[in-house]
Image: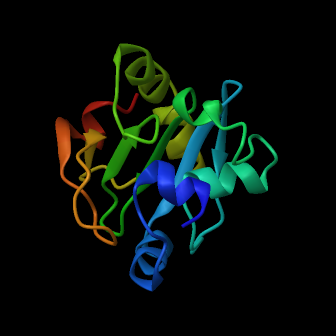
């Protein structure tokens, strides 16, 4: 188990890698929207390491970067940290970048927005703690 796997509490087996490939990753870093490559078989932490934003030894950035995934139905799940939580600050960051995200990837306006994932079975989408409603409600 590598350091990221230990911190996430998830072993990156083939089932987890297949899940990663089924969703798309995004984040806000230094107030800029970043979009990961499609079909990426790794976690946000691994993506951030590949971008040289953090290392396995110096990874406090994972607790500061607002990040999210979009599943194959277009639903959006956002959070911070290895514990996938939300707070008022990241809600503001996420929603202030939603229109920019829509301009880049054309969101499904009938999909839903969720925050704070509750860890469950690896390799599947986890249940969210909070539902905000449809994407269309928040686009300007």
Left or right of 130 on screen, residue 90: right
Q: Position of residue 122 (x, y in %)?
A: 31, 68
Compared with 48, 21 (above or below) is: below
Residue 4 visible in the snapshot: yes
Compared with 134, 47 (above or below) is: below
Q: Position of residue 136 (x, y in %)?
A: 28, 40
Of residue 122 and residue 1, the one placed in the foreground of this image is 1
Q: Position of residue 116 (x, y in %)?
A: 28, 37
The N terminus lies in quadrant: bottom right
| Residue found 45% across the figure and 42% down from its top | 82
| Residue found 82% across the figure and 46% down from its top | 52
Residue 103 is drawn in which quadrant?
A: top right
Of residue 14 and residue 114, the one placed in the foreground of this image is 14
The residue at the far right in this view is 52
Left or right of 49 on screen, residue 11: left
Compared with 33, 1 (above or below) is: below
Residue 105 visible in the snapshot: no
The tally of labels here is 0
């Amino acid at each position: 188990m590598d350091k990221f796997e230990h911190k996430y509490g998830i072993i990156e087996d083939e089932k987890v890698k297949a899940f990663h490939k089924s969703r798309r990753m995004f984040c806000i870093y230094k107030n800029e929207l970043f979009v990961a490559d499609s079909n990426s078989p790794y976690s946000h932490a691994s993506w951030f390491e590949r971008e040289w934003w953090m290392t396995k030894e110096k990874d406090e950035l994972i607790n500061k970067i607002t990040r999210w995934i979009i599943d194959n139905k277009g639903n959006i799940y956002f959070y911070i940290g290895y514990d996938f939580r939300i707070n008022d600050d990241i809600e503001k960051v996420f929603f202030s970048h939603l229109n920019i995200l829509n301009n880049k990837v054309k969101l499904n306006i009938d999909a839903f927005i969720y925050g704070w994932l509750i860890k469950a079975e690896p390799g599947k989408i986890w249940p969210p703690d909070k539902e905000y409603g449809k994407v269309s409600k928040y686009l300007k």
